[in-house]
Image: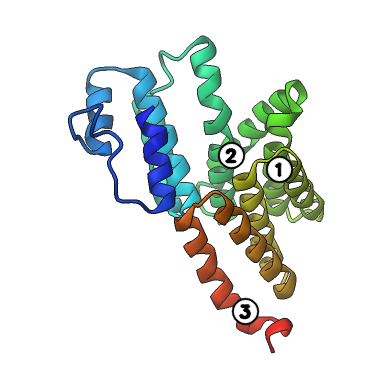
């Protein structure tokens, strides 16, 4: 589908419009507007999923949260049922849970809202992991790690490591990279700069495998800032 091709373009940093041959050259925003006005539920929910995924992976958390709220307000879920809804939730639930945990850790007035989003995601992911460990175990471990991080629970570290191991064994390179990156952030919070640097470097290698150049450049910026603080570079 065009939206998944566009997602690839976005993460690779390519200035291409995958909708050109399908929607007469419309921009992504215009395609979403068209889908909403014409109540094309499958297209609109898929676009919201794709946009949130890209915004989250690229580190634009405010935009990711904005598109989560927009989807809720516009009730894109309303007419979803059966397998279509299930397929949509497989990715959207994972990303929404991570978005929720990011904002819950900010401890703002909306902490309860975002914690609820995360807890719902963990509940769904637990059921799916029990049914298909291969596809969902690493995702559940990462959500659990981020939740333990929120609760200042030392179990977070082992869950991050489990997610990395599961993603590697199941050949989800990009999700292994994400788990490395999240563990690095957790380690920075613990002032463990050298170990954090190693995991940022590992995340970069994973993203390079998928040619996700936008993510590589984002992680390189973190490495550049962190390196002078590490004993290994002194």
Badge 1 marks a residue whose secondary structure is helix
Q: How is the image coloured?
A: rainbow
> Would you say residue 65 is visible in this rendering?
no
Query: Considering the image in quadrants, where does the N terminus appear?
Result: top left
Near-viewer residue (150 or 187) = 187
**Front residue (pair 74, 226):** 226
Q: Is mark 3 on a helix, strand or loop?
A: helix
Measured as percent of width and height from the top left, residue 144 is found at 72, 43
| Res 203 label | none
In the rendered structure, are the residues bearing label 1 and label 2 in contact, judged by CB atoms less than 8 Å apart? no
User: Neighbour class for label 3 at 10 Å: few (<14), some, many (≥20)?
Assistant: some
Dot 3 or dot 2: first in sequence order is 2
Q: Earlier in the sequence, mark 3 or mark 1?
A: 1
Q: Eyeballing the image, is 23 above or below 95? A: above
Q: Residue at x 53, y 38 (%)?
A: 96
Q: How far separated are the C-alphas under marks 3 and 1?
A: 26 Å
User: Picture quarter containing residue 77?
Assistant: top left
Q: Eyeballing the image, is 82 above or below 182?
A: above
Q: Give above or below for 212 relative to 193.
A: above
Q: Residue at x 39, y 36 (%)?
A: 5
Gap between marks 3 and 2 measured at Cα: 30 Å
Residue 152: give x, y in percent of width and height: 74, 56
Give residue 97's mark.
2
Q: Mark 1 to mark 2: distance in Å?
A: 18 Å
Query: Residue 167, which numbered label?
Result: 1
- SS at badge 2: helix
Horizontally, residue 84 falls left or right of residue 198, namely left
Mark 1 nearby-residue class (10 Å; few <14, some 14–19, many ≥20): many
Q: Which of disc 2 and disc 1 is earlier in sequence?
A: 2
Q: What x and y, as percent, mark residue 116?
A: 59, 36
Return the mark for residue 227.
3
Mark toward the viewer: 3 or 2: 3
């Amino acid at each position: 589908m065009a939206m998944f091709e566009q997602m690839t373009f976005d993460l690779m940093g390519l200035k291409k419009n995958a909708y050109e041959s399908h929607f007469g050259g419309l921009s992504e925003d215009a395609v979403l507007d068209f889908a909403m006005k014409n109540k094309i539920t499958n297209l609109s929910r898929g676009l919201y999923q794709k946009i949130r995924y890209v915004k989250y992976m690229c580190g634009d958390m405010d935009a990711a949260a904005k598109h989560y709220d927009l989807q809720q307000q516009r009730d894109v879920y309303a007419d979803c049922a059966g397998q279509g809804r299930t397929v949509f939730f497989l990715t959207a639930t994972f990303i929404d849970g991570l978005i929720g945990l990011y904002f819950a850790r900010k401890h703002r007035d909306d902490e309860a809202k975002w914690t609820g989003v995360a807890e719902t995601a963990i509940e769904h992911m637990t059921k799916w992991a029990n049914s298909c460990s291969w596809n969902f175990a690493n995702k559940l471990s990462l959500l659990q790690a981020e939740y333990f991080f929120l609760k200042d629970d030392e179990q977070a570290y082992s869950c991050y490591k489990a997610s990395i191991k599961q993603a590697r064994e199941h050949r989800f390179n990009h999700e292994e990279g994400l788990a490395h990156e999240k563990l690095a952030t957790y380690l920075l919070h613990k002032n463990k700069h050298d170990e954090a640097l190693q995991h940022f470097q590992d995340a970069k290698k994973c993203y390079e495998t998928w040619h996700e150049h936008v993510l590589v450049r984002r992680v390189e910026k973190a490495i550049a800032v962190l390196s002078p603080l590490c004993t290994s570079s002194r």
